[in-house]
């Protein structure tokens, strides 16, 4: 079945450093790749997304890259701040299934002041 | 815009009882609502896909007779956990989706504790 693998499971960086989280997906028909930030006990919050017709997208300190050939996409956070500490999830749409997403396992990011 | 609410935000119930969770899209009509379950320190696991006016589609391994889903209108879907047991204790999250768009809008989640 469809699968999304996410690495690393935990990531600790110093404030101001960059953080990179990587995901791979299995469904070649996936065309939408959102990234979510989830704080403890809260709903997932969309931070950035990318569609399959785009290779890279940036929003201030956050960027996402997509390599369709390799079925690989990554989240890049620059100039990290303590408030970036949270769990981050990648997801990929499942082809032709009306918005259905499959999620990666999550990455717990800790930004140390 | 695109606000999704869930009620209740938390609930404690006794083993063997049933609990109903409501998911509402407040400012748009959702063609599809998704129900997820999330255990501590784990990812969101899709339980079922709910389309207005039709039967829900359940993911493999999810008992449809235990987790009853009703999607009565384009703004309301309900999840009923029947004969709840302690192992059903979890964080249940719904999301709403409109055909033709990409983004899912998540509700705030419901923390269920079964004693």
Image (cartoon, rainbow, N blue to C red):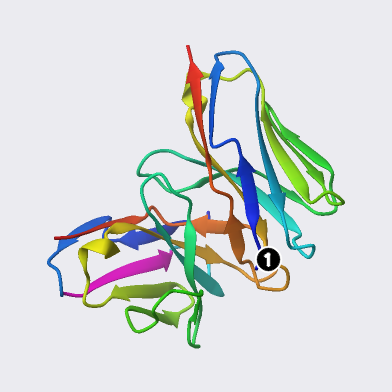
Residue under label 1:
A94
The answer to whether B114 appears left or right of A108 in the picture is left
- In front: A48, or A26? A26
Q: On the image, which quarter does residue A88 sit in?
A: top right
Q: Residue at x 74, y 63 (%)?
A: A27
Q: Chain of mark 1?
A: A
Look at the image and tell me in which quarter the C terminus of chain B lies: bottom left
A64 w.r.t. A24: above or below: above
User: Where is residue A38 drawn, in percent x and y?
Assistant: 47, 41
Q: Please provide percent x and percent y for residue B70.
A: 39, 81
Please give left or right for residue A29 compared with residue A5 in the image.
right
- The residue sitting at 54% across, 48% down in the picture is A105
Which SS class for mark 1?
A: loop
Q: Main secondary structure of the magenta part?
A: strand
Question: Is residue A33 in sight in this rendering?
Answer: yes
B19 is within the stretch colored magenta: yes
Q: Is residue B27 visible?
A: no
A46 vs A107, nearest the viewer: A107
The one nearer the camera, A36 or B58, is B58
- The vertical placement of A49 against B106, above or below, is above
Q: Quadrant of residue B14?
A: bottom left
- Report the span colored magenta: B17-25
Q: Observer-nearest residue: B82 or B63?
A: B63
Residue at left 47%, top 11%? Answer: A113
Give residue B66's position: percent from left, percent from top. Answer: 32, 79
| Residue located farthest toward the bottom when viewing the structure as drawn | B54
Q: Is residue A63 magenta?
A: no
Label 1, residues with CA under 10 Å away: few <14, some 14-19, many ≥20: many
Left or right of B15 in this view: B97: right
């Amino acid at each position: 079945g469809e699968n999304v693998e996410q690495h690393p499971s935990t990531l600790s960086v110093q404030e101001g450093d960059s953080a990179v989280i990587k995901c791979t997906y299995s469904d070649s028909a996936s065309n939408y790749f959102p990234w979510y930030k989830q704080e403890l006990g809260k709903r997932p919050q969309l931070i950035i997304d990318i569609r399959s017709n785009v290779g890279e997208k940036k929003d201030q300190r956050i960027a996402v890259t997509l390599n369709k050939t390799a079925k690989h996409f990554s989240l890049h956070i620059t100039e990290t701040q303590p408030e970036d500490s949270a769990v981050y999830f990648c997801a990929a749409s499942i082809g032709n299934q009306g918005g259905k997403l499959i999620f990666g396992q999550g990455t717990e990011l800790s930004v140390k002041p | 815009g695109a606000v999704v609410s869930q009620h209740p935000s938390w609930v404690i119930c006794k083993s063997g009882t049933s609990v109903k969770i409501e998911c509402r899209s407040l400012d748009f009509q959702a063609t599809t609502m998704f129900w997820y379950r999330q255990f501590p320190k784990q990812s969101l696991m899709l339980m079922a896909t709910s389309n207005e006016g039709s039967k829900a589609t359940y993911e493999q391994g999810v008992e449809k007779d235990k987790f009853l889903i009703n999607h009565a209108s384009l703004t309301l879907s309900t999840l009923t956990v029947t004969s709840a047991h302690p192992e059903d204790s979890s964080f249940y999250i719904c999301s709403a989706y409109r055909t033709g768009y990409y983004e899912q809008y998540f509700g705030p989640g419901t923390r269920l504790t079964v004693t």
